[in-house]
Image (spheres, rainbow, N blue to C red):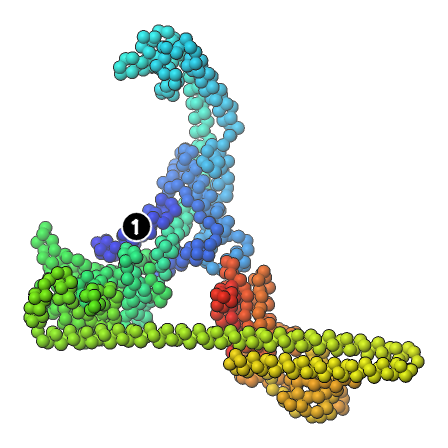
Amino acid sequence: MNHKNLEQLDFFRVREIISSFAMTQEGKQTVLSILPYTDKKQISSAKNLSKDWADYLQAGNQRCFLPWNPCKEILEFLKVDGACLNQDDIYSIGQLCLSVSKFCSVFCKSDFSQNSTFNGKYQSLEKIAKDLPSLTKCENLIFKIIDKNGELRDLPEIKNIQSQIKKKRNEIESIIKNYTTDSNYQEILQSSVPVLRSGRQMLAVKSGYKNRIKGIVHEVSQTGQTFYIEPEEIVRCSNELIEEQAKLERELKRIFTQLTKDLSEFYYDLKLALELMIKLDVAYASSQWGLSNKCIYAQNCNFETENLSLIGASHPLLGEKAVPIDVVFNSGCRVLIITGANTGGKTVTLKTIALFSLLNQAGFPVPAKEGTKLPIFNSVFADIGDEQSLEQSLSTFSGHMQNIGQMLQTADENSLILLDELGSGTDPQEGGAIAMAILDEFIARNSFVILTTHHGILKNYGYSHAKCQNASVEFDANTLSPTYKIVMGVPGESHALDIAKRNGISEQIIQNACAYIENKQADVSTLIKGLTEKYKELSELEKSIKSKEHSINEKWRKVDLKELRVKQHEFELKEQGYKKSKDFLDESRKMLENLVRELREGEITREKTLKVKETIANLSKAVELENQSLEEAENELEQISKDKNISEITNDLSEKTIEFQEGQKVRFGKNKSEAILLQKQKNDKWLVQSGNIKLTIKESDIVQTISSSNKNSVSIEIVKAEDEHKERVGNLSRLNPSSIFNEKPVFELRLLGMRYEEAIKSLEKQLDLCVINNFKNFSIIHGKGNGILQTAVWDYLKSYPGISNFQFANPEDGGTGKTYVSLE
């Protein structure tokens, strides 16, 4: 990539901004050295690592990256025999070790491979963690000598020396204090504060009293009024202090020389760790910049099957002033011709497309929206701005032609060519002709070309050539100013007269200029205006259709939610009815058993007979009341269904292959109680006799028939309504057959507090029961948290056959902590 072109396209300026987000100086310097890659693997690797950082940071995870001082050059001293790193250098290496340990403590946990921590979300970060060498021994060696703040520890080897140094310093301070606090020396001292010269404590003595204090005169002030004297009793102590300090320095040098030698064994591990940690810091800076500018990671596309697309792209250097643009190339298009008003944003659009391509190939995110696709170019050429040069005697046109000539020497099918104001700076007719000839050559080479121009002949060229596409910068005719939006497929007008009027040119001059415009040119302008207005109408219509589509989808979602709630209410009523009936039967059975036992144990009397009859009569009456209660509940559900305007919510599980007849013996209900069919009732119900009790049951509650000849049970064959359910039925083999009719799916599956395996098992069972019971809709409460459980649920739903749709609930119904599920 040409250095001049990268500078023209603002790549270096954006790269410098990205570097400021690095946590280390070495990371920053590495960002500043990055150039766009041309290898797809390098580009994908850099983008994946940056994206993983962005996802990790957005999820609010703990800090796992610590800064360190530069140590790249320090590590090279480890290869030198007898080298001795100082305390600061040793601490810099220690910081690197701490950062590696911190990062690995998060991404190298023993249970990480089982996806229990991050569920495999950050694979690029995990790979770096696995590639990092262990520096635990190196870290222990360093922080055995110094602490985590870089201070020297109390080592046994130097403890006695440090004690002697402290003792001598206290002794010197005591002597100095005796002089400064003694009233006999008050008038002879210039100051009561001692002076430090060359590491020695001295007294500032007035020149007239210099002989009053015995000692060594080290300095005299420039005025000659002050003598700096070291009292003779301090001289001895100072000499002893210097000796002890020299002894300490020799011992520390011995310690650090040995430590440097020990660390040299880890040279290659430290070097590898530094390279990987710098790589992490570069990706960290990229992700932080991306998050602060609302960036996305563009999809890579190839020239043959996919088209370059920018969706909501904003030039990063324009800040809040930037107007997002959409640029989508037509299939097979290789040349984009951008026309329109001056200062309308043509050059900005040109530079935005190029800059985004360069940032993408450097592994950086781009400030755009999802759906942005960018190809990978091997070379980028730009001819932007006024190339006039007085030193080289080049005119504007000559400068442009010189640049284009250099492009034509190497441009190929993998080149991006940017041409600003192609054909300008010379006679318009000749300029337009040379511009078309140049485009012919680039098209022949299958190069990717984006150009801006004011030449009307190039607008016609864009329509007549299959590999060309017109675009324009939008202009507001009411305000006579550009909107900076891009209109694809429509050429633009220069609006020179409108812009001149807005900038103070008189109305008379504008009218005279209009008179000079040929009728033919006016016709072309009218055509362009018509196309522009048509484009605006189509854009508004598209927005209206999308809005209506969204409104319809939202209404359907609300209807589905109402249906789900109605079904839940139905299910709850049924469950209450089943429980009430079961309790009633259990209580009745106990009463009858007690009566039978009383009859067997004693003499049958008239009182006991009347009691039995009374009990049976009460039971019969209770059964009738129960039947009446169930019918009322069913009527209530039917009324709810009508009120809510929802399709029938009855749960027909199957079609039965046996026709029931009066007198036939069957089994019904959860407990498979035996009964005889007495009479067919309305609404697919039967009057049956179970023991001494008569009751009404639904035909769908009959689960078995009993052969009158051999008393063997024959299961009713269940037939699926639709063939596409076969795959789902195959998944039901893991259910316990005895529980098929006893267990029912729930309307709201709660997974909160469950571990990964437990939650998936519960979801799997719920889905299988839904298939058996023809249960179409339910919801899952998985909570928000850090998103692990929600991700696991969604991944399983994607893989389960027969799921027609699943989505998050409304904010008022749980939002992202709850998922609605619909089965086919």
Residue 28 locus on image (x, y percent) = 34, 47
Residue 623 horizontal side relative to residue 272, left or right: right
Residue 569 picture quarter: bottom right
| Residue that lies at the very extreme toward the right in this rendered image | 603
**657 horizontally vs 372: left or right:** right
Residue 211 image offset from top left, x and y in percent:
35, 6
Q: Tell me which residue sits at (60%, 77%) in the image.
A: 570
Give the mark count.
1
* Residue that sits furthest to the top in the current view: 211
| Looking at the image, residue 166 lies above or below residue 181 | below
Q: Is residue 333 visible?
A: no
Q: Locate residue 376, reporting x and y percent.
A: 30, 63
587 vs 299: above or below: below
What percent of the width, then of the height, locates residue 172? 44, 17
Which part of the image, by quadrant, shows the N terminus?
bottom left
Left or right position of 407 against 795:
left
Q: Nearer the viewer, residue 778 or 244?
A: 778
* 448 over 740 or under it: above or below: above
Residue, x 21% and y 65% (percent of image)? Answer: 479
Q: Nearer the viewer, residue 585 or 441?
A: 585
For the residue labelled by badge 1, is the local secondary structure a helix, a strand or a loop?
A: helix
**Amino acid of disc 1:** Glu
Tell me the quarter of the picture where residue 720 sits.
bottom right
Residue at 33% over, 73% down: 543
The residue that mark 1 highlights is 16
